[in-house]
Amino acid sequence: MATAFAADRTFHFPATGVRAGGRVLLLAIDDQSLSLRENLVEYLSKPSVRKEPVLSPDKDDFTAPDQVASHFYGAVLQDNGKFRMWYYAVGMKEPGDARHPDVKKLTQGPVCYAESNDGIHWIKPVLGQLEFHGSKKNNAIALPDALIEGVHVIKDADDPNPQRRYKMVYNPHNGTTWVIRTATSADGIHWQAAPTFGIDRFLETSSFYKFNGLFVTSGQRLLFSEGGHKGGRQSHTVVSPDFDHWLPGDVTSFALAEPQNPADRGQTQPYDQVHLGVGAASFGNVCVGLYGLWRNQPGDESDQKRWGWFGYGKISCDFGLVVSNDGLHFREPVKGHVYLSQHDAPATPVPGKNYPTILTQSGNGILNVGDETRIYFGRWLNAEYGKGYHGEVGLAVLPRDRWGALGLYPASANNGAGFGGKPRTSSGEIPDHGSVWSAPVRLPDQGCKVFLNADHAALMDVEIADERFNPLPGYSGAKAGRTSAADGLDCPVVWPADFAALAGNTIRFKINLHRGADGAEPRLFAVTLQAN
């Protein structure tokens, strides 16, 4: 069996059945990959947000498909030396005030395309594919559907057919509701859409990715809640083994609590719901994503406004952080934690007004770029009806893979941490060390390298055990692995014994953290395994 994994440099995680090649991550926010913890607590990171949008609508150009909004129900790829974006455009049906449009007079779609050399400054190239208001001088992509919302794109290096190198899942309207259709392309510009819908039931999409050999699309659905009662927006996931055929049914990938009283449930009721589902990105053995924490407020269903039920000027949306080890079921590292608030990433305002922002997420906007993890996302200004509908693309940044860290219990606050106000150690002392065990992982037959993504990495050591937690004598205790790097995203770990001798074995890592004599606090963000 060992040689079966060697050809593609694969790691195998027995607990989940996941196989992943090349590079895998044991993230601090992932309590399945780094599970058994002693004297450690989570420290979630706070992304830095660029104040200015990276992409905005062309408010003064009636022939622009995105005259009103450049919504990021979209995708970004770093591809062949440039950045490429596909996004959801909203324009005007007829000439008018694009800064204060009537929502009844807006177009939805087409899919539009932009390019950038740095991912910050974008251009909208003239593609000449689709006529919009009498002109083909635009950046619209020709697809067979008149109404389109979300668009999600991956580059599939595993497909031997170059005409299917780029794969798209997009969100057209079938005349009754929003569904999904797939498309393929050799260049990401000219697309061949599938002749039929992939899923012909309501799904508003938030991400599309490959995980463990399956194609996965996530989004929001409005289904029944417990007892057959109405439910609110929740995240659901659909699956395909080959991209062409999508299985019926779905997985409830992430859900917030429904009200106890069934009469208080449903799309228009005032409680927190999951907007657009989980927008997740695959990192080989783990998926990390954001969900929209939709603060629902009802509108007036009796009025004549478009979508009168919608809470214009009232609804807002923040981001919550989620993680998954099977690509289907997601959980929050810290329940209810707002990872990115609309107040930290507001849309460009209407002068003199303080309207809420709805943050919109797509997992296809999460990507590692050099030493950064970039999060492209949407900022939808939820103005009062007719007083400033607007959408733009924003950017938040983390140091690469630093979604959150594990660190020691804080020394300054520990005296009140236990029951009865006593410290958590049996001796009554403040703990100055902690540890975390990894899930078992089978190493590739040709071996791998181990790196710590950490602050004060020199205050850590890494022991190795078998899958039943029995320490391996040559790789534990005084012979544990250490790094000479003080801090960094890729601090190499070296053992006195030959780590290559463990190639093909199933092992666990135990990472030990020690508080510095000067009070320095180590922080572990991730363990990275890189196949040789």
Image (cartoon, helix red, strand yellow):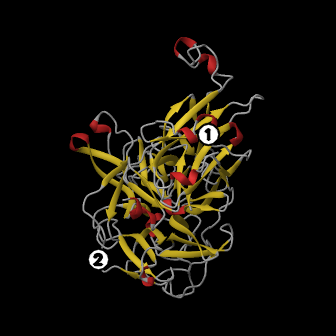
Q: In this orientation, which residue lies closer to the viewer: 513 or 190?
A: 513
Q: Residues within 10 Å of mark 2 (few under 14, many from 20)?
A: few
What residue is shown with label 2? 196
What residue is shown with label 1? 480
- The x, y position of residue 529, in whole percent, is 55, 54
Q: In this orientation, which residue lies closer to the viewer: 467 or 67?
A: 467
Identified at 57% across, 28% down, the residue is 39
**Amino acid marked by disc 2:** Thr
- Whether residue 379 is visible, yes or no, is no
Mark number, residue 504: none
- Furthest toward the top, the residue is 420
- Whether residue 262 is visible, yes or no, is yes
Quadrant position of the C terminus in the picture: bottom right
Assign a secondary structure to mark 1.
Answer: loop
Residues at marks 1 and 2, CA–CA distance in whole angstroms: 57 Å
**Amino acid marked by disc 1:** Ala
Identified at 78% across, 29% down, the residue is 518
Q: How many marks?
A: 2
Q: Residues within 10 Å of mark 1 (few under 14, many from 20)?
A: many
Assign a secondary structure to mark 2.
Answer: loop
Q: Of the residues tagged 1 and 2, which is closer to the observer?
A: 1
Q: Is residue 159 above or below residue 475?
A: below
